[in-house]
Image (tube, helix red, strand yellow):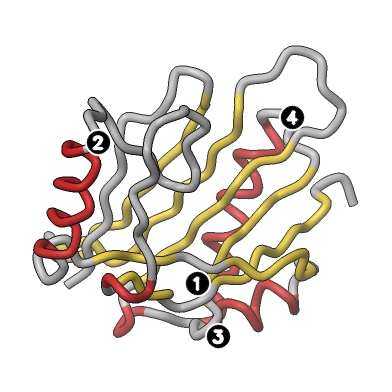
Amino acid sequence: MMRYWWTSGSLSQVHSRLVAVRDGQAVAFVGAGHERWAERPERFGSIRVVIRADEWSQPEYVRLVRTGEGWLKSEGVVTAVARVREDFKQEVEELRRIGYREVRRLRFSELDLIANCESLLAELAQAIELGSERVRTANDDAKAPMLHINEGMGYRVVAPSIELHRDLES
């Protein structure tokens, strides 16, 4: 079974999403999108291809990447950006083979809120005792007490990802 979901997206973004269905089941997904722009020469667009494991093949993966790139080009995108988990070796290899180059490595993290409920509640209780109406994380610029979410609370890095770019004008 393959599951894929998306939010409605921001009004500042434009998207194209295609789902391939065989025998009533989703077998592949192609998503492409970009920010709305007025007159910016650096027009980046993202592409995401997911194929059910038992349907995956090199030619099909490349075909779907090219489908997403085609839509991005029709929208005026100059550079396609693909972010793929590091452990998806086939996908990374194919993207490199068709001209994508690695730009950076990314780390994504997750926190199991249920498993770490007690320590999170303790942090929140401390903020309430200080008279705070809100707390912030390290990503928040507000001047509120910091909610310290860290590895000690069960925060863990999930599979690192690779960001790859390909110039679509060439």
Instruction: Give the residue number, with chain letter if any, for mark 4.
Output: 76
Tell me the mark number nearer the camera, choosing from 1 and 4. 4
Tell me the mark number nearer the camera, choosing from 2 and 1. 2
The residue at 33%/82% (across/down) is 53
Image marks 2 and 1: residues in contact by CB distance under 8 Å: no
Dot 3 or dot 4: first in sequence order is 4
The residue at 74%/12% (across/down) is 38
Image marks 3 and 1: residues in contact by CB distance under 8 Å: no
User: Around disc 1, counting alpha carbons within 10 Å, would you say few (fewer than 14), some (14 to 19), or many (20 or more)?
Assistant: few
The residue at 65%/83% (across/down) is 93
Q: Position of residue 79 (x, y in %)?
A: 77, 46
Residue type, mark 3 in image: Gln
User: Around disc 2, counting alpha carbons within 10 Å, would you say few (fewer than 14), some (14 to 19), or many (20 or more)?
Assistant: few
113 sits left or right of 39 in the view: left
Dot 2 or dot 1: first in sequence order is 1
The residue lying toward the viewer, choosing from 22 and 16, is 16
Tell me the mark number nearer the camera, choosing from 4 and 2. 2
Q: How many marks?
A: 4
The residue lying toward the viewer, choosing from 135 and 46, is 135
Image marks 3 and 4: residues in contact by CB distance under 8 Å: no
Q: CA distance from mark 2 to mark 1?
A: 57 Å
The residue at 21%/47% (across/down) is 126
Q: Secondary structure at mark 4?
A: loop
Q: Position of residue 65 (x, y in %)?
A: 58, 60
Instruction: Give the residue number, with chain letter if any, for mark 1.
Output: 60
102 sits left or right of 4 in the view: right
122 sits left or right of 74 in the view: left
Q: CA distance from mark 4 to mark 2?
A: 52 Å
Instruction: Give the residue number, with chain letter if any, for mark 3.
Output: 90
Q: Position of residue 143 (x, y in %)?
A: 46, 28
Dot 2 or dot 3: first in sequence order is 3
